Image: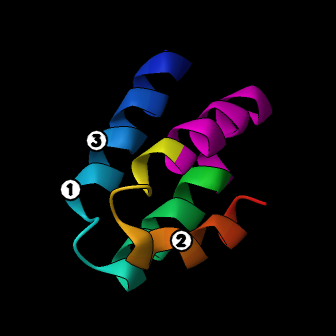
Amino acid sequence: MPRMIYDYTKTVLERVSFDPVLFAKELKKAVKNLLPYEIEQLKRWLQFFIQEKPELEKCLKVVN
């Protein structure tokens, strides 16, 4: 079950990546709902994902 939540979180973040404010808001929700090891996975995924979207770079502060 937790893996489904992690996958859903990534899907939501991909869909709202057009708006940095909305992206940060969804990222904050994700951090509250995910398990610690999932947050680590999400950090790694985010570092890869934001390479193509530099405007989202400041959102990394939410997970650090």
Is any atom of residue 57 visible in this view? yes
Q: Amino acid at mark 3?
A: Thr
How far, Cα to Cα, is label 2 from label 1? 16 Å
Residue 4 percent coordinates (x, y): 41, 21
Mark 2 Cα shell of 10 Å, populated few (<14), some (14-19), many (≥20): some
Q: Which residue is mark 2?
A: 57
Q: Does the magenta-highlighted stretch encompass residue 24?
A: no
SS assignment at label 1: helix
Which residue is nearer to you in this view: 55 or 19?
55
Residue indicated by mark 1 = 15
Q: Which residue corresponds to the image point at 43% horizontal and 55% vertical from the top-left?
A: 51
Q: How is the image coloured?
A: rainbow
Label drawn at residue 11 = 3
Whether residue 34 appears in this view of the structure is no
The region drawn magenta spans 32-47
In space, the residues marked 1 and 3 are separated at their CA atoms by: 6 Å
Q: Disc 3 versus disc 2: distance between alpha carbons?
A: 18 Å
Query: Is residue 28 left or right of 49 when viewed as pictured?
Result: right
For residue 38, above or below residue 28: above
Residue at 45% from the left image edge and 31% from the top image edge: 5
User: Which of marks 1 and 2 precedes in the sequence?
Assistant: 1
Was residue 44 drawn as part of the magenta stretch in this picture? yes
Q: Position of residue 52 (x, y in %)?
A: 33, 57
Q: Amino acid at mark 1?
A: Arg
When asked about the image quadrant of residue 7, the answer is top left
Viewer-side residue, 51 vs 42 = 51
32 lies above or below 17? above
Is the C-beta separation of discs 1 and 3 under 8 Å? Answer: yes
Which quadrant of the figure contains the C terminus?
A: bottom right
Left or right placement of residue 44 versus residue 57 in this view: right
